[in-house]
Amino acid sequence: MKNNTKRIKLTKKDAVILLICFAILLIAAVIICSSGTGFGKSEIINVSTAEGREEYLKGYGWEIDKASEDFQEILLPEEFGDNMKDYLKMQNEQGYDFSSCCGMECSKYTYVVTNYPNYSGTVYAVLYIRGCRVLGGDIHAADMNGFMHGIK
């Protein structure tokens, strides 16, 4: 019986090229995933799309008016002052490490929430996103008797 297997001969040059390609892929994966540990909803759902953001919020029970979307590119401050202490605490309680995002550019998406219970005023959902990862967010009412809490 004749064996028809072929052997590929790998030269040192080819091995180095393969290692460099593997290293580049590994570095790219680390950069993409560097802003958190584990896989949360934002890693499973593509929040870089309107449909993904809607699905993300719906996963926590919030329904939004997609037509109300407001988008801003923002630069987070290098340091958060004392006036942001409560907001950072709220983000941390939700599992977001918002303070590690100091100095980063991100996208801020705001939507009108259509299913907030027992409140007659306008309620907003805000998501801060960098790439395809949620950095933080909140649910709030901006009127005189307003409130703010986490999205989770």
Image: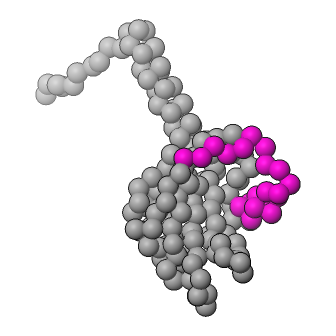
Is residue 86 in the magenta section?
yes
In the displayed structure image, the side of residue 62 where residue 82 appears, left or right = right
| Residue placed furthest toward the left | 1
Front-lying residue, 116 or 132: 116
Q: Which residue is drawn at 86% across and 54% down?
A: 82
State the image quarter where residue 88 is shown. Answer: bottom right
**Residue 78 locus on image (x, y percent):** 74, 40
Q: Which residue is drawn at 49% across and 50% down?
A: 132
Q: How many labels does the image show?
A: 0
In the displayed structure image, the side of residue 108 where residue 49 appears, left or right = left
Q: Residue at x 51, y 25 (%)?
A: 23
Q: Which residue is drawn at 38% across and 9% down?
A: 11
Front-lying residue, 129 or 17: 129
Q: Quadrant of the N terminus?
A: top left
On screen, 138 above or below 132?
below
**Residue 81 locus on image (x, y percent):** 83, 50
State the image quarter where residue 147 is shown. Answer: bottom right
**Residue 69 locus on image (x, y percent):** 46, 63
| Residue placed furthest toward the bottom | 118
Tell me if residue 115 can be seen: yes
In the displayed structure image, the side of residue 129 where residue 37 appears, left or right = right
Q: What stretch is highlighted in magenta?
A: 73-92
Tell me if residue 41 can be seen: no
**Residue 90 locus on image (x, y percent):** 74, 65
Is residue 72 in the magenta section?
no
